[in-house]
């Protein structure tokens, strides 16, 4: 009985990595396969406030910077199936309905990662995905400074 139980545990341990990989892969299956502009998922005009934590410090964007931010973030497109290692950059966005989310970026901020929960439009396309990666199309959000 002891040997039989040991063999079952050993067999389970050998398939465990496959099961974990399968679960991760399946969780990304419901994520959209095609790149979309971020405006496909959130109403950019509904962004009311943006807090920035970048290489220049921690601050809230003024009205002029907020207009610029909306224009620049609107250029971003989703990169389905990609995960990134985020760095120091954090952007806290508040929508007009009070919903808040955090965009995190790598040091050059060419890619941003955000929870899929931000999707207020077409959200069903991200049912089982945890994160949305955005390509900023070259916009560097580390260029924002406290004004």
Image: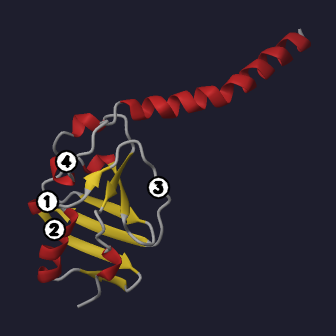
Q: Image height check: is 48 above or below 121? A: below
Q: Are marks 2 and 1 in contact (CB under 8 Å)?
A: yes
Q: Which mark is residue 44?
A: 1
The disc, 4 or 2, on the residue closer to the chain's N-terminal end is 4
User: Element at badge 2?
Assistant: helix
Q: Image height check: is 108 above or below 33? A: below
Q: Which mark is residue 41?
A: 4
Estimate how packed mark 1 is, as few (under 14), some (14 to 19) or many (20 or more) residues with alpha carbons within 10 Å: some
Q: CA distance from mark 4 to mark 1?
A: 9 Å
Q: Which mark is residue 84?
A: 3
User: Element at badge 4?
Assistant: loop
| Residue 69 position in % (x across, y down) | 19, 72
Image side of residue 131 versus residue 50, left or right: right
Q: CA distance from mark 2 to mark 3?
A: 23 Å
The disc, 2 or 1, on the residue closer to the chain's N-terminal end is 1
Image side of residue 141 versus residue 74, left or right: right
Q: CA distance from mark 4 to mark 3?
A: 20 Å
Q: Are marks 4 and 3 in contact (CB under 8 Å)?
A: no
Estimate how packed mark 2 is, as few (under 14), some (14 to 19) or many (20 or more) residues with alpha carbons within 10 Å: some
Q: CA distance from mark 4 to mark 2?
A: 14 Å
| Residue 27 position in % (x across, y down) | 43, 33
Q: Are marks 4 and 1 in contact (CB under 8 Å)?
A: no
Q: Which mark is residue 56?
A: none
Q: Residue at x 23, y 91 (%)?
A: 147
87 or 99, which lies in front? 87
Q: CA distance from mark 3 to mark 1?
A: 23 Å
The disc, 3 or 1, on the residue closer to the chain's N-terminal end is 1
The disc, 2 or 3, on the residue closer to the chain's N-terminal end is 2
């Amino acid at each position: 009985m002891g040997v039989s139980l040991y063999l079952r545990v050993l067999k389970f341990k050998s398939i465990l990595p496959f099961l974990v990989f399968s679960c991760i892969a399946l969780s990304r299956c419901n994520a959209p396969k095609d790149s979309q502009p971020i405006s496909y998922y959130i109403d950019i005009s509904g962004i009311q406030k943006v807090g920035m934590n970048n290489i220049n410090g921690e601050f809230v964007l003024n009205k002029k910077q907020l207009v610029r931010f909306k224009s620049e973030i609107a250029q971003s497109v989703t990169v389905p199936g990609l995960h990134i290692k985020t760095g120091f950059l954090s952007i806290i966005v508040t929508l007009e309905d009070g919903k808040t989310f955090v965009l995190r970026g790598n040091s050059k901020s060419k890619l941003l990662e955000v929870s899929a929960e931000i999707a207020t439009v077409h959200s069903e396309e991200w049912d089982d995905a945890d994160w949305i990666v955005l390509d900023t199309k070259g916009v560097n959000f580390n260029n924002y400074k406290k004004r």
